[in-house]
Amino acid sequence: MQTLLLWLFYISSFYAFIPGLITRIFGFRVFRRGITEHEYALTFDDGPDSVYTPKLLDLLKRYNAKATFFVVGSHAEQHPEIVKRIYDEGHLIGIHNYVHKSNWLMRPGTVKKQIMKTDKVIHTITGERSSYYRPPWGIVNLFDFAKRSQFKIVLWSSMFGDWRERIGADRLTERMLNKLQPGEVMLLHDCGLTAGANPDAPQQMLIALERVLEEAERRGMKAIRIDEMIEAKEKAPERKLPRLKRASVKVWLLWETLFHAMFRLKSIRPYDPFIHYRLRTYKGQTVEMNDGATLSKGDKVIELHFDNEKLFRLGVRSRSMVHLAIQMIRATEDQFPELARIILSDPELQQAKAIYGITMINRGPKNFGFKIVDLKDGLFARSTTMYLKFLLRIINPSGQERLKDHAEQMVPKLLVMSVAQLIERFSESGSHRRQQVKEPSDPQEEKKGELLDLNLVASSQGIGSTPPAM
Ligand SMILES: [Zn+2]
């Protein structure tokens, strides 16, 4: 008996779990997440539902949002008028099996029948065939790979437990807002009649969604269909990078995720992560800061880290190092007032004497009020140099050649500013509120290859675990 169970386990693993795992980890041949600047995707599974889908359509129309509906064939058959309305109002229709059953429980032939039958239902109602398929519970089996020529498998990058009514609109809103960012593919449900769901759960979803749509509008973000999301990803500059580079970026971003979890980094603006921070004890040399205050060993400091994914995105979209530097200055300038506010409202952070980060030098950070200090030569300085060079190579595709020319000149430095000065300069109560920070504005500058004059603050993510002992 035991052997039989074990054998069954192996077979089922091979059939359903392993391919599922592969797609989850590597995003292999399956679409899960887009690459966009201001767009995100809303996807609704299990419908249509006679009560909630029309309400949802009203809501989407009010916010001019487009979505993707992965319909269950049998539900679509019961409510053709709703399917027609989804189609007429410009949303995309995908397939979510004919009955809501896991592919794991069905033979490949049965799965195929489920899909074809649903496709036919959609075609009869709308006159158009669907090219998008989402398996129930995201369970993909080997067969799904084989038939991929006809259908694109679409999974998701975030789900929220909205199929349970007890989650409540407030908690759901919070979870959704945490994930509201460009490229995100959100999984929601407009029907609570499938196994494991609560019939009136979509009621909570609709309340939460309205708040999310409101916030998205405020942030200038737009909900788009999955086909538009896929097209945008195919055109994204990131996709044009050589394969090896893309692979190293993936590994490196994975490291970033681990680093954030390990050291509990927080973001100044969680929905638009650019600068992360953490409170720690300073272990370096004594530094006299620009306002005359001193930072010594044992003082509390706020360590800053740039978000590498964002840096990478900015990098591949930048025409040059100068262009990249300008964008980084703008983003930093934009977020520092928020950092000042966060510090003022957090007694623990108020213990910090200074904020600091590691950079590849220059004048730019001086304009922010930073004191720039040399790192003493040692293992830390050397590993930081290596890491920052690697980082520059990744974030700036066009800069690789230039980087070689300037490699010797690039030395990491420590940037320090007292918290008092940060608040003075950037908080609303500060006297120099929102003063303009000077930018390297001359586009000719890049031609001169003046890399050292740029405000290229790089993250010390890679060596952040090593205390800056100098
Ligand atoms: Zn489902």
Image (cartoon, grey):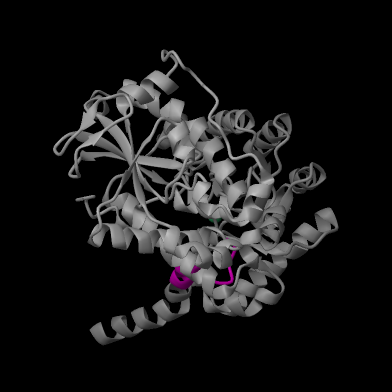
Q: Is residue 26 magenta?
A: yes
Q: Residue at x 57, y 78 (%)?
A: 143
Whole-percent x, y for residue 243 in the image: 57, 74
* Figure quarter occupied by ligand 1: bottom right
Q: Is residue 131 visible?
A: yes
Q: Quadrant of residue 336?
A: top left
Q: Nearer the viewer, residue 274 or 49?
A: 274
Farthest residue in the right direction?
127
**Nearer to me, 152 or 457:** 457
Give the residue drawn at x 74%, y 43%: 82
Q: Residue furthest left?
A: 298
Is residue 229 on the magenta stretch? no
Q: Residue 315: name its quadrant.
A: bottom right
Residue 166 higher or lower than 224, as above or below = above
Image: magenta residue range: 20-31
Estimate the x, y position of residue 106 in percent, counting from the top left.
Answer: 53, 73
Q: Is residue 229 above or below residue 367?
A: below
Looking at the image, residue 103 sits to the left or right of residue 81; the answer is: left
| Residue lying at 26% horizontally and 86% vertically, measured from the top left | 3
Q: In the rendering, at what x and y percent does residue 252 appear? A: 42, 63
User: Which quarter of the rendered picture does the N terminus lie within?
Assistant: bottom left
Residue 103 seen from this side: no
Q: Which of the pair 316/393 is nearer the observer?
A: 393
Instruction: Tell me which corner region of the image, top left, top right, bottom left or bottom right, holds residue 60.
Output: top right
